[in-house]
Image (spheres, grey):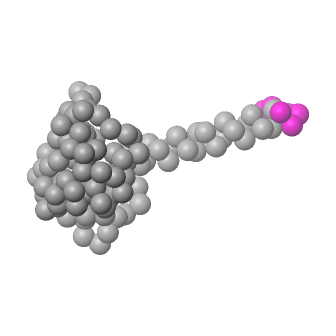
Amino acid sequence: MDITVKEFGNRIKLLRQKGNLSQEELAVKVSTSQNIISRLEVGDGGSLKVAFDIINFFRTMFNLDNFLSDKFNMESINLNIGGMRPLDSVAIERLVELQKTIHEELNYSIGLLQGEPVG
């Protein structure tokens, strides 16, 4: 099952409420406006940058391993005692793998352009 924009917004709202924050307080924390937070929460869209900023903010408070999973539920959202750990979510692991792949492909392309032997 894919997560819809509306479901994503609802999850943001649930995190905000669990963190005892108003929309305005969250907006200040991620340097945006209360109106943008409201639009995100009801599924009316918003920027990916703001969405990532919100997720990164909440990662300092909660363990978000299942945030983008079909298995997400508020019971799976626990306090992130001890702060954020590196690579504690599937999303970050996938981004790191993508980074490695892109790096390898760039190095290969640069080698070809510099006339290095392929192989």
* Residue 14 percent coordinates (x, y): 14, 49
Question: In the current view of this chain or complex, which residue is farthest to the top?
Answer: 1
Which residue is located at x 55 percent, y 44 percent? 99
Q: Using the rendered view, name the quadrant where residue 69 is placed.
A: top left
Q: Is residue 67 left or right of residue 51?
A: left
How many tags in the picture? Answer: 0
Viewer-proximal residue among 32 and 94: 32
Residue 108 appears in the figure: yes
* Residue 79 percent coordinates (x, y): 20, 64
Asked if residue 63 is among those painted magenta in the image, a careful observer would answer: no
Which residue is located at x 28 percent, y 44 percent? 36
Quadrant occupied by the C terminus: top right
* Residue 91 percent coordinates (x, y): 38, 44
Viewer-proximal residue among 107 and 15: 15
Which residue is located at x 29 percent, y 72 percent? 82
Q: Magenta segment, principal secondary structure?
A: loop
